[in-house]
Amino acid sequence: MPTVDVYNLAREKVGSLELSDEVFDTEVKEHLFYEVVKAQLASRRSGTASAKERAAVRGSSKKIYRQKGTQILFRAFHHHPRHPRLSFFTLWGINYH
């Protein structure tokens, strides 16, 4: 059985302990050390990640119409959530509400 010295706060030897072979006489598993250190370092991080809630998002960055094959006159920005005047659009000088 392996033995370990026991010291007090003044660093004086006060005794020794015998360690059990069932617990301390095994091979070292390095990947467990890695997992423990990784978990401890992760718990130290501040965790400031965030995402906007539904009320904080204004409009969308999605493309509102495909690149080719569409006429901008009919599908342009009057249907887009970021357009300042969503309620109507003008087509040949006529306002559609």
Image (tube, rainbow, N blue to C red):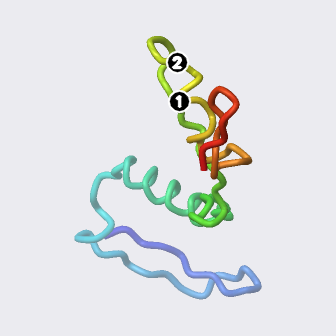
Residue wearing tag 2: 71
Q: Residues within 10 Å of mark 2 (few under 14, many from 20)?
A: few
Q: Residue at x 72, y 79 (%)?
A: 11
Amino acid marked by disc 2: Gln
Q: Secondary structure at mark 2?
A: loop
Q: Which residue is more in the foreground, 73 or 51? A: 73
Which image quarter holds the N terminus? bottom left
Left or right: 82 as drawn, with respect to 35: right
Q: Which residue is more in the foreground, 51 or 86? A: 86
Q: Residue at x 52, y 56 (%)?
A: 37
Residue wearing tag 1: 75
CA distance for labels 2 and 1: 7 Å
**Looking at the picture, how far across and down is residue 16, in whole percent?**
49, 81
The answer to whether 40 is drawn above or below residue 66 in the figure is below
Q: Residue at x 56, y 41 (%)?
A: 79
**Looking at the picture, how far across and down is residue 57, in whole percent?**
63, 56
Q: Residues within 10 Å of mark 1 (few under 14, many from 20)?
A: few
Q: Secondary structure at mark 1?
A: helix
